[in-house]
Amino acid sequence: MSKKIVVIFAHHNFTDSRIQRSLLNGISNLQNVEIRDLYKLYPDYFIDAKKEQSALAAADLIVFQHPINWYSSPAILKEWQDIVLEYGYAYGEKGTALKGKDFLQVVSTGGGKEVYQPTGNNRFKIEEFLRPFEATAYLCGIVYHKPFVVHQAYRISDQELKERTKDYVSLLKSYIENGNTALDPLNTHIL
Amino acid sequence: MNHDILLFLVVVFSAALIAVPITTRLGLGSVIGYLVAGLIIGPEGLKLISNPENILHLAEFGVVLLLFMIGLELNPKNLWKLRRSIFGLGTIQVVLTACAACLLLTAIGWDLGPSLVAGLGFSMSSTAIVMQIVGERGIKNTTVGKSSFSVLLFQDISVVPIMVLVSLLAVDEVSKGPEINPIAAILSIIGIIVGGRYLSRPIFRWVAGTKSREVSLALALLIVVGISYIMTLVGLSMALGAFLAGVILAESEYRHELEANIEPFKGILLGLFFLAVGMGIKITILLASPLQLLGLVTGLIVLKIVLLSLIARFFEVEGRDRLLLGILLSQGGEFAFVLFSSALNSKIISPELAALLNGAVTVSMLTTPLLLILYDRWAKKCAIDDAKPENDKISNDGHPVIIAGFGRMGQIIARLLHLNKFSTTIIDHSPDNIERVRRFGFKAYYGDATQLALLEAAGIQDAKLFVIAIDDRERIIEMVDIARSHFPNIPILARAFDRNHAYELLKRNVTYFERETFGSALNMGESALKILGIHPFKAHRTALHFKRYDAELIQKQFAVHTDEKEVISTSRAAREQLEKLFMEDSILFADNSSSNWD
């Protein structure tokens, strides 16, 4: 039985985006993938928790796809977590609605892989910046996998971007067919 | 004869016009002004008016209207809450004062009959004076205000048995008290209750449908006059009947309209009443026995203040308020005049004694405002000494928000406020709207909100916000002017029609306004951008950006806005303004939404 995926997408200036547009266009026609573009659905930030929760209910894999803005997600994705992941739904005594689901974060960064190192300009690895997401997933009983990262957003060549988009598409396709064996586990030892 | 009436009216109104502003300016209140004016123009003064008794007869109707309006503010539920103070405080006050005064007077050698008449008369206070003062001081909803009202109400109720008592004292058989037909009395009271409950609403609605102010005015007066007439027929007090009718109509949604209609008549007739009392002061007789008068007045006032302050202790009146209550009710009342004249007719008292007693009551009416000034001085000093100010016991009878106009705008505003548990009072001039509002459980009143009296009746003095959402640009400005000049502190949120209307509002310092179609135009603009393929978030931000920009533009243009543009409704001027707007848009509006993230 094929798996279902929901992609929670956030980009506050999608019109001028290159990387994220390419990634999103790549998966936009896949079967079993629902894309929820938050800035499009909720331009006034007034997120409908019930609607979002029913979208999550149908999915086996939850994807957060967004650029890294100031070492975190765009603002609306934080708002989405605050509103949708309610007590009694996602966590707490009866909050088991998301338990056992898989989670994948798909992010793009301006800097290259080398600046996301203890010795680089950003001083931390990308996984460390994403710790709040990992912890959130853990609390909700969601399985957090190794994030899919596209570096060098401003310098990446069209060819390379095409390659990375293809990787992303085949990763999701493989999940739909095979489930979470397609995803790499988060190897905490390397951090 | 016509000339006489005209001359009379000219004299009366001029006297009021001269005397009342002087005394209110001096902080004495309007009552003293009327009394003094009456004294000056009366038979003992300039002799401009010779027959004060006739006027008094007409002016007593002012007291009836006053009671009607008091009733309007008290629905049966609130009245029931006051039962303890009406029958407890009221009974004790009347009985104790009458007995004590009677004992004291017999002790100094008066006969029992005159002593009792004087005692009963002195136990009454003046509803007209006290309620006027309570209203002017704005203490209607305080413990003191409510207690004094309870006492006065009981005094009005006790008028009937007292009159019967006096008729029993009558020395000769000529006199008789009011003839009361008990069955007719009970039937008429039931009639008032049933009629007020079930007949009034359809009649009011029908009258409101005629949209004629005169007709609804006539209806209001007919109610009061008609009830008074029925009451005199069955031998009950007119004031009591009017009060009863008021209580029953207090739950009607047309209550504020009634209040607004009756208010000016009440004011004028009450003024006339005080004038007549002033005219009736017989200075020559009083001056013939000044010591006796002084003794009576002092005794009357001191006795009432002392007794009331003591009783008040048992009715939740605290500290200095007890003295305030005593002073408020320390004067003799208008009913004393009626009682004394009836006792005179029954030959219980002599004409000289009647003049003396009337004089004492009148003088005691003059002293109330003066004593209150002394009290205020003293209380102020105490308050400073107290360090911590006393809590005003103002109950939550007022409504925080008044909305004028319950059309397409007012409805949405009211629903939002209602959802957030703000109690709102709605004023609208369409009976259909009022009917609809009531069905949804709002408080709604029929009327024209440009009437100051109606705004006051709706409680604008206690409101936290005044929302003007009516569908008439001139009226909106009128309403703003009225509210601003009488209640400068209340925030106003006004519906603006367009730019120029907004300038008119800004000129009047109304900073909270919304142009009625601006919000929806902005939303439609945003939708248009979205349909044309602009990203929704970008479209939304552009709209918000435009909103901010335009609000700033209005302020900027208002600063350079000249008065010749005020009359702008001409199409040429509007076109010029539009051209200017488009030009400024292209220069000033920069959509600086950020684009520095990929």
Image (cartoon, helix red, strand yellow):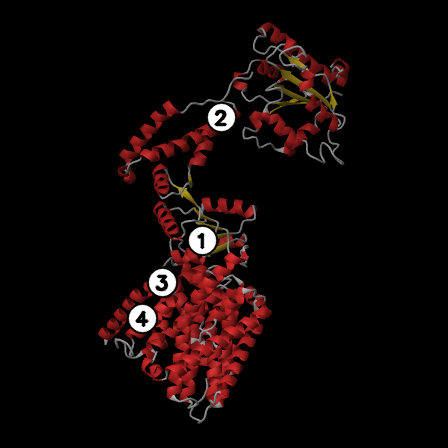
Chain of the residue under label 4: B
Q: Earlier in the sequence, mark 4 or mark 1?
A: 4
Q: Is residue B418 left or right of residue B128?
A: right
Chain of the residue under label 2: B
Which residue position is annotated with label 4? B37
Q: Secondary structure at mark 3?
A: loop
- Same subunit, labels 2 and 4: the answer reads yes
Q: Which image quarter: residue A119?
A: top right
Q: Is residue B477 left or right of residue B421?
A: left
Between circles 3 and 1, the one closer to the viewer is 3
Q: CA distance from mark 2 to mark 1?
A: 38 Å
Q: CA distance from mark 2 to mark 3?
A: 64 Å
Between circles 2 and 4, the one closer to the viewer is 4
Q: Which mark is residue B427?
A: 1
Q: Residue at x 64, y 17 (%)?
A: A107
Chain of the residue under label 1: B
